[in-house]
Amino acid sequence: MTRFAVIKTDNTAPLIAALKDDCDALKTKGHARADTKVALRPIAQRNAMRRAIRHPWLFGNPIVKSAYLSVYLRKISRQYAVLYAQLAADASRSALIFNGFLAPNALLDLAAQELGMNRLYVENGFFPGTLQADLSGINGFSTLPRDAAFYDALSAEDTGVQWPHNFEVRRSKLAKKTDNPLPDRFIFVPFQVPSDMQILALSPWIADMMALYGEVEKLARSFPHQHFVVKEHPSFPRSIRNKVAQHGNIHFANHAVTRDLLEACDGVITVNSTVGLEALVSGKKVITLGNAHYAIDGLVKRAENSAALHATIADLPGWQPNVRRRETFIKFIYNRFLIPGDRKMPTDETVVALKARAAGKDTYSQLIGERHHVAYSH
């Protein structure tokens, strides 16, 4: 029987309640010593980097950053020891890790790895009413195959038949409409949260949204008849709009509904946003710049540097995604990889699916042959 150990936070409290007696809620406060030495500085530096991105006026100061790192390292060292001791009491459990990129869940990940425990990473799913749950990680770290041949070999019975119809509703970044009218034809560029793991851990050559805008600006100069529409992520409080050079072919649409922009665009350029997957569902052409779980040959065009991005834009009008591969991939994602349930309101079905995924006994695990734990690393 699968039993979980999980840190109780706002994100995991509903799951803990749903799992009931099959889950142990772990504490991060207390006194303990861990008989192991692990490198915690990268986790502390990761947290400091996120703070510097969100609050550069404070954490951009090297003295403040150094003092913060020193204090934070001591804090997470204590937390790690407490978590390690609790896990060591019964290493037969599965560590249920929310996201896994930041402390304290990154500490739970390390402790479970040190003890050789099974780990299951969970996060919000790509569509409403779904969750990611994977033995390797979330998003680009997941066990989802990137091999086109894998999907070409799947049958309708393997993938299931349901198709996603609901997308996440992304609110406007602005209180009221202040943007200019959009062009009739354009490529949509959804910005992402620069302090999120998608950028910090899964974006090899786009460091932040200033860098992404810079690449779009190069494209606008190289392709004078091509328009680009940018929407900044509504969850990130800082805007670059007044910090970049304006270009007549680059249009900000922070007021717009993402779904409307998807339906109107000719294609999407994204690092690895869920919007890219939604664009595939909508039958749009997609260019990825980072490590994305849907960056598969025949589904998207991948650009691993600026020169490749320019070549891809030049070739885009004559390129079409593989129709069957696209349909197979999306159904496989929706029916097999994602598990049913809202993180805030998990059901009994969610609990059953989590246990089966952790044990490697669900249809998804059987189809990909997942029978071992894959190390999650950044």
Image (spheres, rainbow, N blue to C red):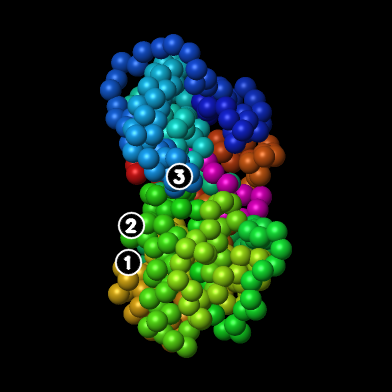
**Residue bearing mark 2:** 204
Nearer-N-terminus badge (2/1): 2
Q: Amino acid at mark 2?
A: Pro
User: Which secondary structure, mark 3?
Assistant: helix
Q: Please tell me how crowded label 3 is: few (under 14), some (14-19), or many (20+) other residues with Cα within 10 Å.
A: few
User: Is 205 in the magenta?
Assistant: no
N-terminal label among 1 and 3:
3
Name the foreground residue: 153 vs 320.
Answer: 320
Q: Position of residue 361 (x, y in %)?
A: 50, 41
First along the sequence among labels 2 and 3? 3
Task: Report how far apart the C-alphas of labels 2 and 1 lie in the structure.
Answer: 8 Å
Evaluate whether residue 141 shows in this view.
yes
Which quarter of the figure is the C terminus placed in? top left
Q: Residue at x 42, y 65 (%)?
A: 212
Residue at image x 39%, y 43%? Answer: 60
Other-residue count near label 1 (Cα within 10 Å), few / some / many at <14 / 14–19 / ≥20: some
Which residue is labeled 1 in the image? 304
Mark 1 lies on a secondary structure that is: loop
Instruction: Name the amino acid, label 1.
Output: Glu
Judging by the rendered image, the residue that carries numbered circle 3 is 57
Residue 199 percent location from the top left of the image: 42, 53
Q: CA distance from mark 2 to mark 3?
A: 26 Å
Please tell me how many numbered marks the rendered image carries: 3
Residue type highlighted by circle 3: Trp
Q: Please tell me whether residue 82 is drawn above or below residue 189 in the rendered image.
A: above
Q: Which residues are magenta?
A: 118-130
Identified at 45% across, 71% down, the residue is 245
